[in-house]
Amino acid sequence: MKRFLGGLLRWGISLLCLVYAFHGVPLSDLWEAMSRFPVMPMIAAILVGFAAYAVLGVRLMFMNPEGYPHLTFRSTFCASLVGLALNNVLPAKAGEIAKAVWIGRDHGLSLNTSLGIVFMERFFDVNVLALLSLWFLWQQGQPRVMSLFLLCLAGGWAVLCLFRARPEWGHFWEHLPLPSKITDFLTRFTLSLVEQMSPRRLVWMTASSLFLWMFYAFQTAICLNGAAGLGFSWTETVAVFALSSLGMLLPSSPGAVGVYEAVMLTVLTAYNVPRDQALAVALFAHMAQFIPVTVTGGLVFLLSPRNKGSQPVPTPGGRF
């Protein structure tokens, strides 16, 4: 029942966002606005997206545990494509588990180890989103809120450093009055995360994550200025990118269908972009992020030799 209600809430939010986004925009006007987009910038936006996915693969390559060889780019790139594709069509971020299983089987890693690598990836992406939030608050002249946000972010890092120094404290979740599945996940998540916090890996993750999100921002800039011809400044472009990225954190259907369009539409209309043009660029930007990687990742998954015949089932403590 809880799963059903959760799914109903997510899909309900997506549906409401779609109704809000398309309200008052005739489909003929929407099609006319999209038909004016030049082809070359549209292709460029898609290619920049795939360049970002390649950076995802490179970021994973140098996250190998101590004592293991480097992860191969072919494996990490394919795992990233498959993970993104599954996240776009399945709930509960199932693609992250698929990515962990993929790189684990390719390199002989235990499930805990490969999950730790993926958890570290997601953790740094959340940190970049936090930086985007700080940037937006600074642009809006909200020093008090920004200071509180910085304090919370610093507090989270302090707790992680404490767990790194005293790994046994990561088991404190087991003493909380929560269902065993939740406490087991939190314990495994905490221990896997702090195991990845070597100085070398932290430096690499910081640099590669910032570089990755620069590609994402550049893709948004191409959609806004190259395809739609809005002529936004870099500051305005980053503001649109920051808010649309933060909007993806809202509970919704897989792929944030509806939510992304509603958030970007709201931001663009605040910059006095006509509603039909704002919805057109929001739809194209989302399609450029959603369709190519979903199709490509799905083909990689279906055509992979690992899906032919039976495969060993991974266990939390063992190898694949």
Image (spheres, helix red, strand yellow):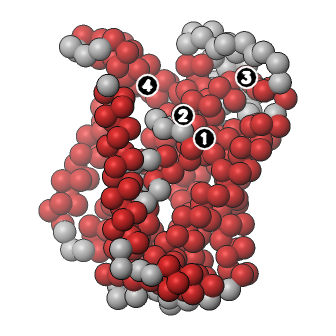
How many residues crowd around disc 3 within 10 Å: few (fewer than 14), some, or many (20 or more)?
Answer: some
The residue at 39%/47% (across/down) is 11
Label drawn at residue 189: 4
Question: Helix, strand or loop at disc 2?
Answer: helix
Q: Earlier in the sequence, mark 3 or mark 1?
A: 1
Q: Kindly identify which residue carries mark 1.
A: 86
Q: Earlier in the sequence, mark 4 or mark 3?
A: 3
Total label count? 4
Q: CA distance from mark 3 to mark 1?
A: 18 Å
Residue type marked 4: Phe
User: Is residue 188 visible to the viewer in this orientation of the structure?
Assistant: yes
Q: CA distance from mark 1 to mark 2?
A: 6 Å
Q: Kindly identify which residue carries mark 2.
A: 94
Q: Earlier in the sequence, mark 1 or mark 4?
A: 1
Q: CA distance from mark 1 to mark 4?
A: 21 Å
1 and 2 marks in contact (CB < 8 Å): yes
Report x, y in % for residue 304: 81, 34
Quadrant of image for the N terminus = top left
Question: Helix, strand or loop at disc 3?
Answer: helix
Q: Kindly identify which residue carries mark 3.
A: 105
Q: CA distance from mark 4 to mark 2?
A: 15 Å
1 and 4 marks in contact (CB < 8 Å): no
Residue type marked 3: Arg
Query: Would residue 156 be found to the left or right of residue 291 on screen?
Result: left
Residue type marked 2: Ala
Q: Earlier in the sequence, mark 4 or mark 2?
A: 2
Q: Earlier in the sequence, mark 2 or mark 3?
A: 2
